[in-house]
Image (cartoon, rainbow, N blue to C red):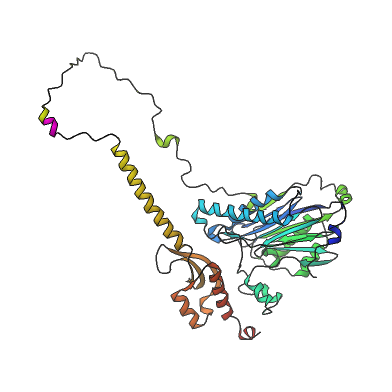
Amino acid sequence: MPVPEEDDTLLNTPDPDPLHLSYYAVSDVGRVRKDNQDSGYAGPWLLAVCDGVGGAARGDIASSTAVGELTQLDAAPTAGDLLTRVSDGLHEAHESIAKQVDLDPALSGTSTTATVALFDGHRIALGHIGDSRAYLYRAGELSQITTDHTFVQSLIDEGRITEEEARIHPHRNLILKALDGLHEVEPDLFAIALAPGDRVFLCSDGACGVLEDARMASILATGSPEFAAIEMVRASLDAGSSDNVTCVVADVLTGEEAAADTTLAGLEPMTVGAAAEPKLRMPRGLFRGHRSGDTGELEPIDAEIPEGIDYAIVDDPPVDPEAYRYAPQAPRRFTWLRRVMALAVIVGLLWVAFASAYWWTQQQYYVGEEDGQVVVYRGIDGIPGLSSVYRTTDLAVDDLPEAARSDLDAGIAADDYEDAVSIVQNLAEQMMPPERADQ
């Protein structure tokens, strides 16, 4: 079914009766992963799913941070462009992730997908980046209304592979866009008019990556939003999903239907997944103690002369003016302070120079190999301490042609991260079977 278009007739109707959402969200860690890096949210005005990426770099921090920012959009519509609000929300999430990385450099490399639907009573404005998805179930037919930002999706768009082949493609998890606090945010933004009886479905790739459209449509065809969301997670796990699974389902109701729905009156916004238990990450050394250990607040103690001991006051001996003339002079007041300040300035300048040089190295990228896999490095090739793995792909080096392996051994320089992604895509295409490469 084609993606529904904006219904101008509905939007131009004078004071149309507002619609309402009945919603449910659920997230499951799955049967393979140790922790849940997905985050989801469902409220009367906002639906969102974020799938964290990063492994050791804590994708759960990225997804929960993004959802924490996006929940501020869950408010009754006001004057202003709906798409602008969604775009601003995604940029705020992007900036918040950047601040988290600044506080803890160990988070460098973390990122998250984001699929957001903002409701105004008549339509939803969607913002999308990554490979989480949004669907619309209408009149018995299911439509995917977002497009994945993945390598395999680019192959589908070029007619190189089919949707069915994409589900089992070895590089199906290679994401080309995400919120990472580093690269420019370029989400897809569009709006869709809703109608009573519509059902909106958002999910992470733990669900849509294993379930076919027909299976999802059959689940969305029956039951309440709660039933559909939970059943979608169960079906995904039974289908062999090895990822976290997050599903958000919302029904579009008329005012009369909403008033008759006894469960809607007490329905509270739902936060699920990693965002439901935010991980506090404090900057190291934030608490340093009162006055940094200074005991200057103690009152001075007056020394008392013990009884029985006599003290004699002795006049200083006369000073020889000539000896005084050549005697070492006492240092001038505050000389030590001036020296410390001068040293601090020098150290500060050296630190600025070092930090600037290090920052420049961290804007450099190249493609190489690590433990038999193709990886994207950040830093300067061959300089210990200034190069680290930034992204690990699922491309096996042994599957590449000999020429490509030789290039990887020497390191393939990239102009920037986007260029590095293009290099990885080119390597992946070299692995394609001959019959596919000729298509």
**Image x and y of residue 219, in percent:** 79, 63
Q: Quadrant of residue 204?
A: bottom right
Q: How many marks?
A: 0
**Residue 326 among magenta residues:** yes
Instruction: Give how far across and how far down residue 418 sits, in percent.
Output: 56, 68
- Magenta region, residue range: 323-331
Q: In which quadrant of the rendered view does residue 184 lie?
A: bottom right
Write the residue at 47% across / 47% down: 284
Quadrant, the N terminus? bottom right
Asked if 107 appears above or below 439 in the picture, the reply is above
Depth check, front residue: 276 or 432: 432
Residue at image position (75%, 49%) is 79
Looking at the image, residue 374 sits to the left or right of residue 69; the answer is: left
Residue 203: give x, y in percent of width and height: 71, 61
Q: Give the percent coordinates (x, y) of residue 265.
A: 81, 45
Please say if 136 is above or below 255: below
